Amino acid sequence: MGVEVAEPSVSDAELDAMATFVFDYLDASVENEENGGRMRWYPWHSAEYRFNHIMNVVELAAEIAEREGADVEVVTVAALFHDIAKLEAEQDAHAEEGARIARKYLETHGDYPPSFIDRVSRSIEQHSHQGELSELPLEAQCLVEADMLDKIGANGTALMLLRMGYEARTHMDAGEMVQRVLTRGREAKRRIESDAAESIAHQRLKRVKWFQEWLEGEIAELDVDDERP
């Protein structure tokens, strides 16, 4: 009779240590870049924003994984590391580089089975996948869906309006900027595979649509070109 090897139980203390490592890595990436890094005047290119995004994705990905029957620990750890290289690597290379960093960390900070490390690393590598999400393992799918969901809803709207100030736009452009959030959200909803992520996307899109309708009612001559899915 074969012996089943149980997957590791990652403790809260271990997750806290990982989160600290990720933030410190992001912060060092900013400090090490010449002239403050790429577009550093945008707040979402700071260590603070990137870490906040990561923690949002951790929460969303864990919720989706639990509801869909995926391995919550693999998804949670992958979500923690998924953007660790975002501020130092090129966009098309940050997923692969993040997987490398995560693998090295897990191999040197605990006694995690190789299979667990492989699954975490593979999920990170695949989180920038642009094809059908059904092509991915369930854990990677949960991570991709969570990553998309953080960019829509109230959070996505707040970030887009904040961007207006950095681009010296006026409130008359708010309709256009909110519409971008709706368009992005509808595109994400069309890609989503899981029922859990679809439910979250639906609720978040409703919030953005309500906000857009309030703007239309309060700002004269607001230009909104709404596109229905």
Image: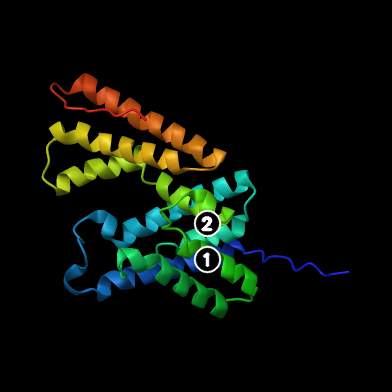
Task: Tell me if mark 2 has few (under 14), some (14-19) or many (20+) residues whose alpha carbon lies within 10 angstroms of its own.
Answer: many
Label 1 element class: helix
Residue at position x 28%, y 55% in the image = 44
In this rendering, the answer to whether 32 lies above or below 134 is below
Residue at position x 38%, y 71% in the image = 25
- Circle 1 sits on which residue? 122
Can residue 157 be seen by looking at this rendering? Answer: yes
Q: Residue 33 in the image: x percent, y percent?
A: 23, 73
Q: Is residue 12 left or right of residue 97?
A: right
Label 2 element class: helix
Give the residue type at disc 2: Ala
Q: Quadrant of residue 15?
A: bottom right
Q: Quadrant of the N terminus?
A: bottom right
Q: Is residue 23 left or right of residue 218?
A: right
Residues under labels 2 and 1: Cα distance? Answer: 8 Å
Can residue 112 be seen by looking at this rendering? Answer: no
Which of the numbered marks, if any, corresponds to residue 140?
Answer: 2
Total tally of numbered discs in the picture: 2
Q: Residue 80 in the image: x percent, y percent?
A: 48, 61
Q: Quadrant of residue 129?
A: bottom left
Residue at position x 38%, y 36% in the image = 186
In this rendering, the answer to whether 219 lies above or below 73 is above
Residue that extends furthest to the right in the rendered view of this protein: 1
Q: Residue 132 in the image: x percent, y percent?
A: 47, 49
**Badge 2 vs badge 1, beta-carbon distance below 8 Å:** yes
Q: Is residue 107 left or right of residue 30?
A: right
Q: Which one is in front, 94 or 210?
A: 94
Which of the numbered marks, if any, corresponds to residue 67?
Answer: none
Task: Tell me if mark 1 has few (under 14), some (14-19) or many (20+) residues whose alpha carbon lies within 10 angstroms of its own.
Answer: many
Q: Is residue 6 left or right of residue 102?
A: right
Residue at position x 23%, y 19% in the image = 217
Q: Mark 2 or 1 closer to N-term?
A: 1
